[in-house]
Structure formats: C-alpha cells, structure tokens
Image (cartoon, helix red, strand yellow):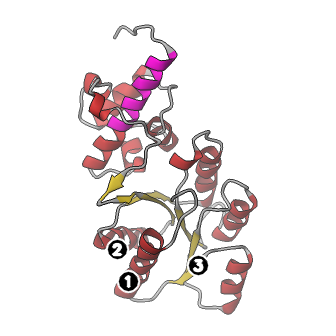
C-alpha cells in the first residue's frame, strides 16, 4: 500500500479518524480494549495509544487491527468527515459522558459479576480489566505520561486487595504517591471484614471500601450501587 506524504495537519486528521473509527467499531462489537488487543495480536497498550490518537502505528499493526474489527484497511482509515472527531472529545451516551472504569481483579467469577452488574445499570460505563498489580501499574504509569491525560486515564479504579505480582495494598500506595494518579478515585474490594484492613485502606487514601458479600446477588448489588454513585452522583476530577 503506497503511503502518501502528508502535512502535520493532515497526519493529525488521519490519526483522529483512525482513533474514532477503531473506538466506535470496537464498541459496536462489544469488545473491551483488552479483548480487541488479543484478537489483533497486539499489546493492550497499543489499543489505548491508537484510540488516543497516536501517530506511531505500523502498517502491519493496522492490518491486524482491521482484520480483528472485520473491516477493510480503507474503511479503518476512512475519510468520512462525520467520523473525524478527535479522541479527546467526550463520548456522550444518553446525555452523559462515558465513565471509564479500570477493574483490577484476578478472580474470573468476580469479574463476571461486575460485568453483569455494570450492564444492569444501563449507565454509560466503559470497563477495562487488568488481572495483576504489575500490569495495572505499568498501564497507569504509561497513561499518566500521556500529554492528553484527560482522555486517557480511567475515571475510577476498582481494586481488589489480593491480586498477584503487586498486591492491592502496594498498588494503592504507589498510585496515591503519583501526582497524576492520586486524584483518581479508588474503590477497594476485599473479602476481609477485619477492621485493620478497613483502617489501613483508608490510611492509604482509598476513596471507599466494599466488603465482598458471600452471595453473588448481594455482591452484584454492592457493585451496582458503587458504580451508580460514581457515574451519577459523584463529581469526578477533570469533568464539569
């Protein structure tokens, strides 16, 4: 495929179109960024960068992405002006800006319940799942270094305390020590009912703590009410 030389403005328009097309097609297929990355054989961070308007994308990666999204490369780089909204624009569903939630959890059953609870709210929430603390920290650190912070970082983190590699307690401390990450609300999830865990979580500046109920229905209700509070009632940093 021949590549035409373009001006800086032309390149910015092209990457904006790519960003919007990928994001909309992914959402139409009901895929998370993690799921799309797996389908395309790309790293999860690549999808974040593309949807954030990164110009540093290889033709090979675009080919893989087009195949995973079941569109042609031409459609992926389409010139429809109506689709050329830049990624930094707030996405609106049902009159509300989409709330980006990062779930850091390694229990498949809990992940399933949280996804089900999210869908039942009917709220415009975009969920990403990371299964260990090291990957979560790497992802958040890369995002915090982005120039366009407001369109890249999650609005809310749901964090399980007992996750592999870097546990939730250490991850919470490192997040709250970072000037760009500390404002993100963090909702802690734990099976522990001990007062010590509650006190230590708030001492580490958690924004709320949810003790996982033993019944799936009660757990789903707890998650649903938490998501509804942060998406509907609370005012999140960087949002008017």
Identify which residue is drawn at 73% across, 66% down: 173
In the rendered image, the vertical position of residue 207 relative to residue 154, given as above or below:
below
Q: Is residue 118 left or right of residue 52?
A: left
Q: Choose the circle earlier in sequence order: 3 or 1.
A: 3
Magenta residues, dominant SS class: helix
Side of 197 relative to 239 (left or right): right
The N terminus appears in which quarter of the rendering? top left
- Residue tagged by mark 3? 208
The image quarter containing residue 137 is bottom right
User: Could one spot residue 212 in this view of the protein?
Assistant: yes
Badge 2 is on which residue? 117
Dot 2 alpha-carbon crowd within 10 angstroms: few under 14, some 14 to 19, many 20 or more: many
**Residue at disc 3, secondary structure:** strand
Asked where in the image residue 224 lies, by quadrant, the reply is: bottom left
State how far apart marks 2 and 3 are (Cα).
Answer: 18 Å
Label 2's element? helix
């Amino acid at each position: 495929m021949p590549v035409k030389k373009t001006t800086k403005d032309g390149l910015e328009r092209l990457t904006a179109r790519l960003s919007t097309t990928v994001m909309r097609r992914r959402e139409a297929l009901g895929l998370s960024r993690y799921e799309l990355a797996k389908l395309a054989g790309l790293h999860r961070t690549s999808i974040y960068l593309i949807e954030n308007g990164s110009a540093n994308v290889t033709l090979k990666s675009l080919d893989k992405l087009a195949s995973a999204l079941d569109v042609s490369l031409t459609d992926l780089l389409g010139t429809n002006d109506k689709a050329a909204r830049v990624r930094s624009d707030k996405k609106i569903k049902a009159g509300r800006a989409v709330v980006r939630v990062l779930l850091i959890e390694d229990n498949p059953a809990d992940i399933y319940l949280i996804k089900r609870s999210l869908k039942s709210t009917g709220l415009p929430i975009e969920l990403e799942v990371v299964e260990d603390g090291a990957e979560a920290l790497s992802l958040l650190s890369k995002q915090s270094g982005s120039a366009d912070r407001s369109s890249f970082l999650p609005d809310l983190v749901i964090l399980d305390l007992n996750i592999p590699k870097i546990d939730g307690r250490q991850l919470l401390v490192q997040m709250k020590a970072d000037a760009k990450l500390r404002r993100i609300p963090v909702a802690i999830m734990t099976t522990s009912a001990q007062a010590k865990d509650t006190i230590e979580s708030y001492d580490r500046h958690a924004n709320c703590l949810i003790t996982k109920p033993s019944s799936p229905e009660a757990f789903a209700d707890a998650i649903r009410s938490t998501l509804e509070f942060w998406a509907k009632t609370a005012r999140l940093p960087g949002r008017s």
